[in-house]
Image (spheres, helix red, strand yellow):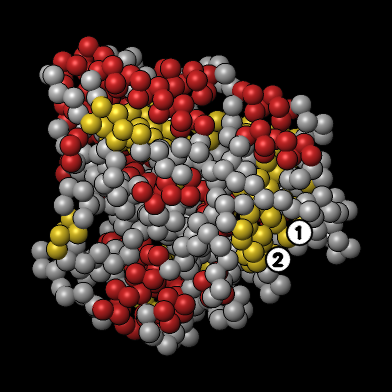
Amino acid sequence: MRVTRISKIVGAAAIAALALSACGGNTGGGSNNNATSGASSSGGGQITVAEVNGFSSFNQSTATGNSDVNGKIWLATHSGFNYIDKDLKVVKNDKFGKYEKTSDSPLTIKYTINDGVKWSDGTPVTADDFVLAWAVYSGYYDDATTDDSGKVTKGSQYFSYAGTTSGLNKTTFPEVTEDRKSFTIKYDQPYADWEIAFNAPEVPAHVVAKKAGLTDAKALSDLMKPLPKGNVDKPASPNATLKKAADFYNKGFDSTTLPSDPSLYLSNGPFIVSAITNNESVTLKKNPDYTWGNMPKVDTIVMRTIGDTQAQIQALKNGEVDIAAPQSSADTLEALQAIPDAQVQKGDQLAYDHVDINQYGSFKDPAIREAFMKTIPRKAILDAIITKQKPDAKILDSQIFVPAQEGYAKSAQENGSQNFQDVDIDGAKKLLAGKTPTVRIMYNKDNPNRVDAYTLIAKSATEAGFKVVNNGAAANEWSSKLGDGTYDVTIFGWTNPGVGVSGVPQLFGSGQGSNFSKFSNKDADKLMTELIQTTDTAKQIELQQQIDKYIWDSKYGLPLFQSVGVEAFSSRVTGGVNYQPNQYGVWWDVWDWAVKS
């Protein structure tokens, strides 16, 4: 499974705008007897797409719901002010509404939602949906103090947000017009990613409000408006109703089956979820009322969870699925290319695998972290997973950049990554000085690539004196364990949306929701604050290079490799299947998917 992060460096799920998302891998099956049916007389029909991971939440913005598949289903069921195309450009959706910068000093953005835009229960989408989103994205009401493991020791933390609150935490409560159609956001400081700060509402505010005992979405906004901004130095007594709303927001939309309460899976986009079989499939039906965006061409989409690569390839070959997105490997590519009439798309992804080490608990000592880093066989992992499909691939030597980006070469040369090119068992033993620390390694045990990486790392670490504990978790449990303190090291991947710089503080900013290893450096935080206020590209690169070095100096862990993506589709599918390197893949223009009559 891949976790998405909000707009990282170049360029994860639209969380607030976009978010970096995590990945692991899944197993499962499910059948679809209508997968090869022709288009209806109206031109509709059905497309079945195979994905590696299983669905787990209708709210992709929370730390536990922020996975690639959840984001893809979210994308198909939501519409907003803009979206990211295959060239990683921001495309405005004027059918949904409009937004405009009305002032540079202070930075002020006005958003207006068009008449007729509504949720699938008939409730209009209003500014109050975005007021709730603002409360989540800004962390405005939080006044919590946490310990090294991230546990709240004082004050309150309301919304569990996967993205970064940097940027929007420098805004005031949105100004909402009386008709609830427009809202204005004012920033105290410049914000580089302002255009992607608000895309579509993550979840319907009227549902969250009612679950908290309020009458409607406006009542929730009215509750929040007079509440003071959180102050960690002077934490206030928690507001019970806001806490109830936040608790529901954080967990209430999680489900691996279709909820009996239809308000938990409302849509304001081109499709509506109509059925879910746990760890097997999600069925989407065309939203009959949808007119405020790109119009879908098919009536039904079935997302089948098929974690086994060969099973996914066979399903495409047999006509059981129309689109396949298996885990990439040399064998995968060869097998897909051998399928008659299958069209194959391949490219580098804006995703990378990495090994992260907790900076607290038994690994709080940087010498122990460094010793473990010296045991990680990055070249062997690269050869086992990537080299056969991309012979010129090299290990990744930056926590922020990928090789194609301007800034990567200099950062890799200066950040300290050159000290970890090869395994150094003797160096690790010297740092351990006779100690034999226990290291609990967590990863997705249903993902063959992660199993390979774990096996190689465990063998090497054991040679240096570490006592390795296999904390592999099932695919449908893995992402919920991130940051829970039950492991010391984790192996997983990040993927990002391809725009903006907010993904850097999302992962590495002190106290941020996706900073699972609890890295914290005041100097790096200052640079990240400057980064999100900077629009000059050259300056952004320079700042990120400096941040990259702080991360390496902390003995954070090691990046492994940039991921390769491969997707294939049958000749039955026409139009709209276009490779995109971010977490949405071919789903980015799901409305254009069509089948031959």
What residue type is disc 1 on? Val
Query: Horizontally, is 41 left or right of 188 in the view?
Result: right
Pointer 2 with pointer 1, Cβ within 8 A: yes
Residue in the picture at 64% in, 28% down: 332
Which residue is depicted at the point 19% across and 29% down?
437
What residue lies at 16% left-to-right and 75% top-to-bottom?
237
> Of marks 2 and 1, which one's residue comes earlier in the chain?
2
Pick the residue in front: 64 or 168.
64
Q: Which mark is residue 518?
A: none
Residue 257 spot, x, y in % from top left = 56, 62
Q: Amino acid at mark 2?
A: Lys
Which is more toward the observer, 19 or 472? 472
Q: Where does residue 544 sit, x and y in percent of width and height?
A: 31, 37
**Does residue 267 appear left or right of residue 172 in this picture?**
right
Q: Would you identify the image quadrant in which residue 239 lies?
A: bottom left
When the figure is inspected, residue 38 is found, relative to residue 541, above or below; the finding is: below
Choose between 276 and 125: the one closer to the eye.
Answer: 276
Q: Is residue 232 left or right of residue 8?
A: left
- Report the residue marked by disc 1: 298
Residue 279 percent location from the top left of the image: 57, 52
